[in-house]
Amino acid sequence: MSFFIAILPILLLFVLMLGFKLSGHLSAFLTLVLTVLLALFAAPDTSAATVGWSFVEGALKAIFPILIIILMAIFSYRILVESGKIETVKVQFTSFTDDKGAQVLMLVWGFGGLLEGMAGFGTAVAIPAAILIGLGFKPMFSALVSLIGNTVATGFGAVGVPVTTLCNEVAGSGGPTAEQLCEISSFAVLQLSPLFILLPFIILTLTDRKAVGKNICLALWTGLISLGVQYACAHYLGAETPAIVGSIAAIAAIALYARLFLPKAEKREDAPKFTAKETFQAWSVYLFILALVVLSGGLFPPVSQFLKTHLVSTVHLPVIDSTFKFAWIGNAGFMLFVGATLGGLVQGLSPKQLAVLLAKTIVDLRKTVLTLISLIAIASIMNYSGMIAAIAGGLVAVTGSFYPFFAPLIGAIGTFVTGSDTSSNILFGKLQANVAGELGLTGSDANWLIAANTTGATGGKMISPQSIAIATASCHMEGKDGDILRSALPYALLYIIIGGLMVYFGL
């Protein structure tokens, strides 16, 4: 199969979403139809059975565990909204100092990163932007800093789904080893390392251009702590906890810096006061989820081993000779469900209210279900029909030894088109692995190039149409999507270039 035929599904996805501005689920479904036709009639030695079982594999991977995790992540956030405890969280994030820079950084980098790590799916843009508007910041500023802040954490968003998916895509039927998962996770953090400091500095400078000294010190302090904690979590625990624990560390770091060096918040008589019980209730959902995720991760091997070896379903897929496995209690989606349910009960919601809320969440995500199943099936069919291999060969022929510099751009394009780091990894993760093979890279060098896809995908998140649409809605800027895109584009290009340089010189 030629490069030009193999790349048609990707080009069609671009044209449908950007040219015709079709919805994501319809664009993905139409692209899936084209992919099936190309696999059947243009790919040599690809039978209908191969295409059919490739689709089944893609559907299984989409549902277990990606869609389950996304569903439970949104469910956990909606519990806070339904119980009203989200208001407590908002107030507590703005009462530690009157310094505008620290407030903004706390919201978009700390709280936004935590929301991304726990839930993702636009909450990390929508909630911080809405709070900033409520605090009196201008809509364009609120949208821009929220988009800039919602970047490095997205690689490990929704309890690590993007990187976990990337590893599953490139590992084959046996799935990734714990060592490979930790290595790719830590490589992604290393490739993003300069941005952990640069992005907080940009956010602080956009807030207050005159306070250069404070901006440098606070950016260094917050960025280095975020980087160190995320790298440690990625290296030792894998993909589930870096964004969550790293964001909690960033929140603590900003609060400590504000307490030591910044003016304290003025006491107001009408300011709400919360007891320890009320604070625990407000944070109970995230506290329970965090505890369960850490307990089930690599920090406690006996617990992790038990969860991953009990109640495991195995499905053999003939023709493509693949085996699909899913641990019902040993996955992040189950931990999200248990933690969110316990937190909802603590916050005063009844089991009936929680069941109704879960049902509404499932219904609301019906288009996302079609989108993800279509995208993952596209990636699976392209893989087994030889399309991804053909694209990899073409890219290597054009870029040669300079391909690693362009690898993050591929990931960024995937996120720009699909709006999702996970979807970008689905579309292009296998491609990056194939290019690594074409370049003769093996072992850790190959994993370094594979990690580049999620590195670039996090940058593409800043300017993806879906993220910008969420920002415009949250900041009441309907029709201003183009203005926001133009404002964010220079920062996104700088982000992707830095990622490319890190990948190229890191090999």
Image (cartoon, grey):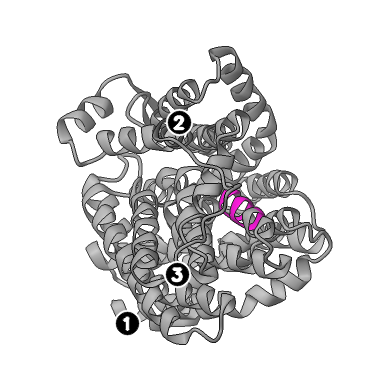
User: From which residue to which does the magenta span run?
Assistant: 123-130
Which one is in front in this view, the residue at disc 2 or the one at disc 3?
3
Q: Earlier in the sequence, mark 1 or mark 2?
A: 2
Q: How would you rate the neighbour count of disc 1 (Cα within 10 Å): few for under 14, some for 14-19, many for 20 or more?
A: few
Mark 3, other Cα within 10 Å: few <14 / some 14–19 / many ≥20 = few
Locate residue 74 relative to residue 432 in the image: left or right: right
Residue 492 image offset from top left, x and y in percent: 57, 74
Name the residue beneath numbered marker 1.
505
Magenta-highlighted stretch: main secondary structure?
helix
Between residues 367 and 233, which one lies in front from this camera angle?
Answer: 233
Circle 2 crowding by C-alpha within 10 Å: few under 14, some 14–19, many from 20: many
The residue shown at (54%, 34%) is 59
Give whichever of 216, 276 is nearer the camera: 276
Q: Is residue 336 left or right of residue 185?
A: right
What amino acid is found at the position of numbered circle 3 in the picture?
Answer: Pro
The image quadrant of residue 255 is bottom left
Q: CA distance from mark 2 to mark 3?
A: 29 Å
Q: Are marks 2 and 3 in contact (CB under 8 Å)?
A: no
Question: Which residue is labeled 2 in the image?
Answer: 281
Residue found at x 46% / y 72%: 200
Pointer 2 or 3: first along the chain: 3
**Residue that carries the numbered disc 3 in the rendered image:** 263
